[in-house]
Amino acid sequence: MSEHQTDAVPALELDPLDRKIMEAFPGKTVRKDLTSLMKRGVNVPTFVLEYLLGMYCSTDDEESIEQGLDRIRRILTQNYVRPDESERIKSKIRDLRTYTIIDKVTAKVDEYRDIHVATFSNLAIDPVVMPDEFVREYPK
């Protein structure tokens, strides 16, 4: 992903229903045109983009949207784990002892040891002991 993308934010004319939805569900509305714009050249699952767009671009203010898109680009560049970079990220985690990543996590119960274990899809770490409170707090 290029940090210097120059894709302009397409202008969007909101009708009264769109405005009402944005007011009623702040941080939950996603402009699908922005999803398409961000998806170009980025191999990230759509649900990840839509979650970030909902957090940082759920507004009708063009300047705020542009700032939000820049922030999303930085977040993805720094935190999304691509499979071909997994060893570099593991090394970073080892050196820093803590590092925020975006990856698909699958949790299972190890009934023999009576614990939850997790698998990180792109980071290729398997298995990791997962605290029970994480499973309860984040059921999906």
Image: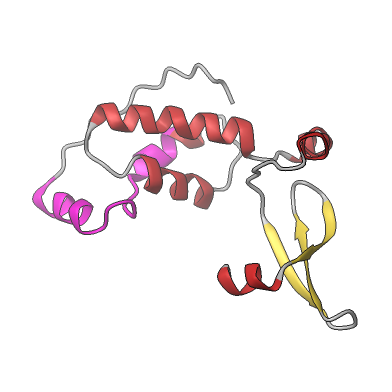
Q: Is residue 77 left or right of residue 115?
A: left
Identify the image's colour scheme: rainbow, by chain, secondary structure or one colour. Answer: secondary structure
Residue farthest to the left? 16
Front-lying residue, 23 or 40: 23
Residue 138, position as x, y percentages in the image: 57, 67
Taking the magenta stretch, the answer to whether it contains residue 73 is no
Task: Say which quadrant the N terminus sits in.
Answer: top right
Residue 125, position as x, y percentages in the image: 83, 52
Q: Quadrant of residue 87?
A: top right
Relative to 87, say whether 120 is above or below: below
Front-lying residue, 81 or 9: 81
Residue farthest to the right? 112
* Residue shown at the point (45%, 45%) measured from the top left: 52
Residue farthest to the front? 97
Task: Say which quadrant the C terminus sits in.
Answer: bottom right
Q: Is residue 50 left or right of residue 28?
A: right
Q: Which residues are magenta?
A: 15-37
Residue 110, position as x, y percentages in the image: 84, 77
Residue 34, position as x, y percentages in the image: 38, 38
* Residue shown at the point (26%, 41%) measured from the top left: 59
Relative to 109, say whether 71 is above or below: above
